[in-house]
């Protein structure tokens, strides 16, 4: 006789991160998170300065379709270098903080890389 499934039984255990659950590697997740943070910073500047699509075309020297992708949140398709360039062209600075895991190194240290 087949075992009946309990309604409260969990059929899938989540890692707590949907990207990992979908099969993304740690490196892919880190890159997506970096893109997200760069995008957030760009959009904060755009909203704060009330830039319109035409303004961004001139400032970023990009055609309308690329600006449209940016303004519609399609930043995952963009390269990190492109998003970093946009941020610096808008007058901001991007920094990267690297944390070394204690398991690989006896002491924890931080390294900051300034882009732009």
Image: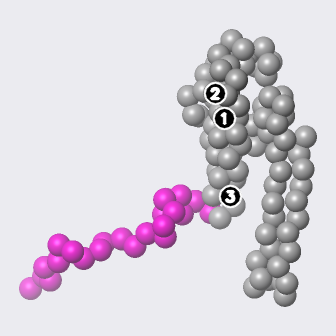
**Numbered marks: total:** 3
User: In the rendered image, which residue does mark 3 sit on?
Assistant: 30
Quadrant (top left/top right/bottom left/bottom right) for the C terminus: top right
Residue at 30% x, 72% y is 11
The one of 102 and 14 positioned closer to us in this rendering: 102
Residue at horizontal 56 percent and vertical 28 percent from the top: 72
Q: Are marks 1 and 2 in contact (CB under 8 Å)?
A: yes
Give above or below for 111 relative to 75.
below
Q: Which residues are magenta?
A: 1-25
Relative side of 81 to 20, left or right? right
- The CA span between labels 2 and 3 is 26 Å
Separation of marks 1 and 2 at Cα, in angstroms: 5 Å
Residue behind mark 2? 47
Residue at the extreme left: 1
Q: Is residue 23 magenta?
A: yes
Residue 44: mark: 1
User: SS for tag 1?
Assistant: helix
């Amino acid at each position: 006789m087949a075992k009946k499934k309990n309604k409260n039984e969990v059929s899938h255990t989540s890692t707590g991160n949907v990207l990992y659950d979908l099969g993304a590697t740690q490196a892919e997740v880190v890159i997506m998170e970096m893109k997200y943070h760069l995008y957030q910073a760009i959009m904060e500047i755009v909203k704060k300065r009330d830039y319109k699509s035409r303004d961004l075309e001139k400032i970023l020297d990009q055609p309308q379709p690329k600006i449209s992708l940016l303004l519609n949140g399609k930043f995952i398709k963009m390269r990190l270098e492109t998003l970093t360039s946009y941020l610096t062209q808008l007058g901001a600075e991007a920094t990267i903080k690297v944390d070394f895991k204690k398991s690989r190194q006896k002491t924890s240290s931080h390294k900051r890389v300034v882009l732009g």
